[in-house]
Image (cartoon, rainbow, N blue to C red):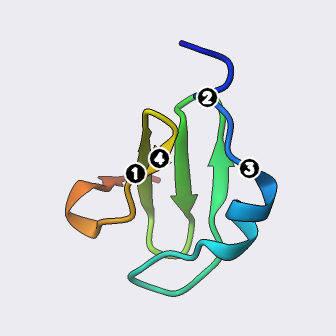
Amino acid sequence: MDEKLSRVDPKLLELLVCPLTKGRLVYSREQNELVSEKAKLAYPIRDGIPIMLVSEAREIED
């Protein structure tokens, strides 16, 4: 994957919140996702764009 597309701007990460819980998101570089630990959801990043839809998120198992 292109190095540029696999990064999230830290300033953007500060602004984005989980649409379900309004909580903080953590960037997972390995999975290229934004993770909401509170909602146990991982939002994908496609072509460098975070997809912030609950319907597109992957559920995280404990």
User: In this view of the protein, which residue sits in the foreground, 38 or 57?
Assistant: 57
Q: What is the spatial separation of the Cα atoms under label 1 and label 4, in whole angstroms?
A: 24 Å
| Residue holding disc 2 | 6
| Residue holding disc 3 | 9
Q: Earlier in the sequence, mark 1 or mark 4?
A: 4
Numbered circle sitting on residue 25: none
Q: What is the spatial separation of the Cα atoms under label 2 and label 4, in whole angstroms?
A: 10 Å
At label 3, the amino acid type is Asp
Q: Please identify the quarter of the rendering in which residue 3 is found.
A: top right
Q: Position of residue 20 (x, y in %)?
A: 39, 82
Q: Given this view, does label 2 or label 1 mark the residue nearer the observer?
A: 2
SS at circle 4: strand
User: In this view of the protein, which residue sits in the foreground, 5 or 30?
Assistant: 5
SS at circle 1: loop
- Taking the view exactly as shown, the residue that stands out farthest to the left is 55
Q: Earlier in the sequence, mark 4 or mark 3?
A: 3
Q: Please identify the quarter of the rendering in which residue 4 is found.
A: top right
Numbered circle sitting on residue 49: 4
Vertical side of 42 occupied by 17: above or below: below
Structural crowding at the residue carrying mark 3, measured as other residues with C-alpha within 10 Å and reported as few (<14), some (14–19) or many (≥20): few
Vertical side of 34 occupied by 36: above or below: below
SS at circle 3: loop
Q: Earlier in the sequence, mark 2 or mark 4?
A: 2
Q: Position of residue 40 (x, y in %)?
A: 45, 64
Vertical side of 37 occupied by 17: above or below: below
**Tag 2–tag 4 contact (CB < 8 Å):** no
Residue lying at 60% horizontally and 72% vertically, measured from the top left? 16
User: In this view of the protein, which residue sits in the foreground, 40 or 54?
Assistant: 54
Horizontal arrangement in the rendering, residue 12 relative to residue 1 (left or right): right
Q: Given this view, does label 1 or label 4 mark the residue nearer the observer?
A: 4
| Residue holding disc 1 | 61
